[in-house]
Amino acid sequence: MPRPTAAQLAYGSATVIVSTIAMLLLSQTRTGLGVAVISAAALALGLLVALTVPLPRRRGRHAATRTRTAALHLGGPDTVPPDVAAAGAPAPAPVEHPVHH
């Protein structure tokens, strides 16, 4: 399992704190069992929020090279998307396919 990002930790922690305070104020519970139930619910909600925060996509140089290579093999150099061409990935050498008659 990958390590949580700073955004996941921040959103999850903020959700636990804010939801715990809100539920305690709204329910006006004074019993230990009520506080425990509300705390458990807030923790579950915080975990849900932390796990649903989208992870950043990493697009390194190798991904751009693979996309450019696939485009060149499929449709030629004119089909390379502009964002891939601007990524600075070196163009692969053209592949010669033998013609069988």
Image (tube, rainbow, N blue to C red):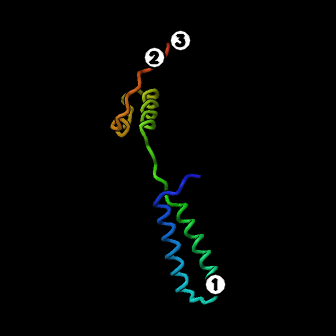
The disc labelled 2 sits on which kind of residue? Glu
The secondary element bearing badge 3 is classed as loop
Separation of disc 3 and disc 2 at Cα? Answer: 13 Å
Percent coordinates x, y for residue 96 in the rendering: 45, 17
Q: 99 above or below 86?
A: above
Judge depth for marks 1 and 3 and give the one in front. Answer: 1
- Residue position for label 1: 34
Quarter holding residue 35: bottom right
Q: Which residue is mark 3?
A: 100
**Residue type, numbered disc 1:** Gly
Q: Residue drawn at (58%, 71%), measured in percent from left and top?
A: 43
Residue 52 position, x and y percent, is: 53, 61
Residue beneath the point at 53% across and 9% down: 101
Q: x and y percent of residue 2 in the render?
A: 56, 52
User: Residue 17, position in %: x, y?
Assistant: 51, 75
Q: Amino acid at mark 3?
A: His
Q: Earlier in the sequence, mark 1 or mark 3?
A: 1
How would you rate the neighbour count of disc 2 (Cα within 10 Å): few for under 14, some for 14-19, many for 20 or more? few
Distance Cα–Cα, label 1 vs label 3? 79 Å
Query: Residue at the location (49% across, 76% down)?
Result: 18
Image position of 87 (left or right of 45):
left
- Dot 2 falls on a residue whose secondary structure is loop
Residue bearing the label numbered 2:
96
Query: Which residue is at the front of the view, 96 or 19?
Result: 19
- Distance Cα–Cα, label 2 vs label 1: 73 Å
